Image (cartoon, grey):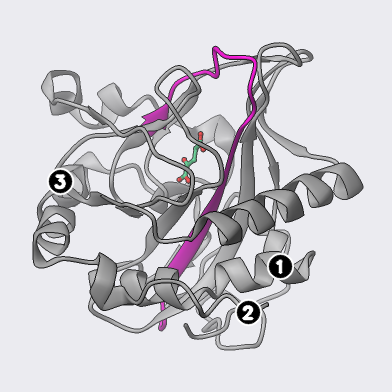
């Protein structure tokens, strides 16, 4: 089975959705994946987590923000198809309005409460943690592989935060020890509304790399299973940063124009 049988970009990305993304820095696109594709990608994700074991983001001994498997697309054929799915990459490219490359794909699992306590996901934007320069259009596709309710820890976004001035953005971190609370960097943050975006299985929410976002804990017994796929500006270059073990052999300023970062 190939992943190219789903809806096309034109079917799912309306002008209104595009405008919403430009103004707010995020948008939910319903049912980008068919039920059978969603099921297949969920099964593949469960297999990979079972085989590989999850890595942990923001962990204590028995509490985590997110369990993940990094670069899932290089570890499972079906998840390669998900990362390069024409409907997802088509929407991403149209939202960006510029050529993009695949940067990374992570399985993002908040286990159900019966397995482990999960914590809220840190308030952050994605640019801060990416070891890249030249991220004007870079965005993340958050793919729901189950229904993701508020109680299960769906994402919330601060509308328009992708347009805030550079002085109100965190500079790139080279370690999470440097992470500063958003309130300290952007005084407006506390008075800005947030929009919480529950998803149905098969929906994809896209957010710009400067959009401030967060997620709640999973308060249910059912695992919250999604994928975060980062599509970067095609001309982005390497800048040493936090999450760069897979590219730290590169020289700062190098373009990421090789088969590990395909154009989409
Ligand atoms: C992202 O995809 O950018 C996230 O921050 C994901 C966080 C989460 O899934 O809780």
Image side of residue 109 versus residue 121, left or right: right
Q: Residue at x 64, y 36 (%)?
A: 109
Q: Residues within 10 Å of mark 1 (few under 14, many from 20)?
A: many
Q: Which mark is residue 173?
A: none
Q: Is residue 105 left or right of residue 173?
A: right
Is 215 in the magenta? yes
Q: Earlier in the sequence, mark 1 or mark 2?
A: 2
Q: Quadrant of residue 246?
A: bottom right
In the rendered image, which quarter contains the N terminus? bottom right
The residue where tag 3 is placed is: 164
Residue at image mark 2 = 2
Q: Which residue is depicted at the point 37% across and 47% down?
A: 171
- Secondary structure under badge 1? helix
Tell me, for residue 78, which label it has, or none: 1
Closer to us: 42 or 196:
42
Q: Position of residue 255 (x, y in %)?
A: 51, 84
Task: Choose the circle earlier in sequence order: 1 or 3.
Answer: 1
């Amino acid at each position: 089975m190939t992943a190219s049988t789903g809806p096309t970009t034109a079917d799912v990305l309306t002008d209104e959705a595009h405008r919403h993304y430009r103004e707010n820095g995020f948008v939910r696109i319903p049912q980008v994946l068919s039920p059978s594709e969603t099921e297949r990608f969920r099964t593949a994700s469960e297999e990979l987590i079972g085989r590989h074991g999850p890595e942990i983001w923001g962990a204590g001994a028995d509490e985590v923000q997110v369990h993940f498997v990094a670069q899932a697309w290089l570890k499972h054929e079906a998840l390669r198809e998900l990362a390069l799915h024409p409907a997802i990459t088509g929407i991403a490219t149209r939202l960006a309005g510029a050529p993009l490359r695949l940067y990374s794909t992570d399985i993002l699992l908040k286990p159900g409460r019966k397995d482990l306590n999960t914590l809220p996901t840190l308030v952050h934007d994605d640019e801060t943690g990416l070891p890249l320069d030249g991220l004007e259009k870079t965005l993340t596709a958050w793919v729901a592989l189950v229904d993701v309710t508020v109680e299960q820890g769906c994402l919330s976004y601060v509308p328009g935060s992708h347009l805030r001035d550079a002085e109100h953005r965190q500079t790139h971190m080279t370690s999470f020890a440097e992470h500063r609370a958003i309130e300290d960097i952007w005084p407006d943050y506390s008075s800005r509304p947030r929009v919480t975006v529950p998803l149905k299985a098969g929906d994809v929410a896209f957010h710009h790399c400067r959009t401030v976002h967060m997620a709640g804990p999973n308060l249910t017994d059912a695992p919250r299973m999604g994928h975060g796929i980062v599509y970067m500006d095609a001309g982005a270059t390497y800048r040493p940063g936090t999450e760069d073990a897979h590219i730290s052999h590169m020289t700062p300023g190098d373009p990421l124009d090789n088969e590990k970062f395909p154009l989409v």
